[in-house]
Image: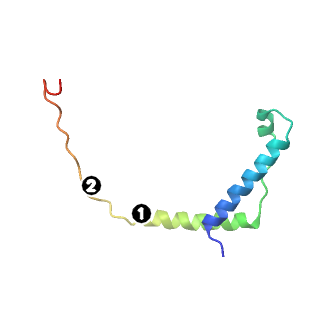
Amino acid sequence: MTDAKDLIRIDIMEQGRERRRYFKQSNLPTKEAFANKPAGKTYRRDRVLHRLMRLNMSRAVRQVSERPYHIPIKTVVVEPAKQGEGQ
């Protein structure tokens, strides 16, 4: 069974491969080729990937929202240099 990380990696590699093939075979100038590029293919895997990403994101948001509001931060006080020092 694949996880979201594998699905994202596969999707990025596949889209890059399709994009490289299209631009390599296209005789149009770059700007026109980009404007007229075909829509990417859609797979059932994409729906699964979107669902996994939604679940992961909602879990991350929930974890962040459950953190305490006050987190102590160590502060460092830097005193300004006096006149005549460092010259």
Query: Could you tell me the amino acid type at mark 2?
Result: Ile
Instruction: Give the number of the disc on residue 34.
Output: none
Precedes in sequence: disc 1 or disc 2: 1
Q: Give the residue furthest to the bottom.
A: 1
Residue 27 is left or right of residue 83, and the answer is right
Quick one: SS at disc 2?
loop
Callout 1 secondary element: helix
Q: Which residue is mark 2?
A: 73
Quarter of the figure that contains the N terminus: bottom right
Q: Residue at x 13, y 29 (%)?
A: 82
Q: Position of residue 12 (x, y in %)?
A: 68, 56
Please provide percent x and percent y for residue 37.
Answer: 80, 43
Residue at 81 percent across and 32 percent down: it is 29
Q: Compared with residue 1, is residue 55 higher up or lower down, i.e. above or below?
A: above
Q: How is the image coloured?
A: rainbow
The part of the image, by quadrant, that contains residue 7 is bottom right
Q: Which of the 4 image quarters holds residue 47?
A: bottom right
Estimate how packed mark 1 is, as few (under 14), some (14 to 19) or many (20 or more) residues with alpha carbons within 10 Å. Answer: few
Identity, as a three-letter code, of the amino acid under mark 1: Ser
Tell whether label 2 touches label 1 (CB within 8 Å): no
* Vertical order, 62 against 77 (above or below): below
How far is disc 1 from disc 2 in space, using C-alphas? Answer: 19 Å
Label 2: how many residues lie within 10 Å, few (<14), some (14-19) or many (20+)? few
Report which residue position mark 1 lands on.
65
Q: Where in the figure is residue 43, as x and y percent of width and height?
A: 77, 63
For the point 76% across and 33% down, the residue is: 31
**Above or below, comparing residue 48 to residue 74 in the picture:** below
Q: Is residue 53 left or right of residue 46?
A: left
Q: Nearer the viewer, residue 52 or 9?
A: 9
| In this view, 1 is above or below 40 | below
Specify the quadrant that holds the C terminus.
top left
Evaluate whether residue 37 shows in this view.
no
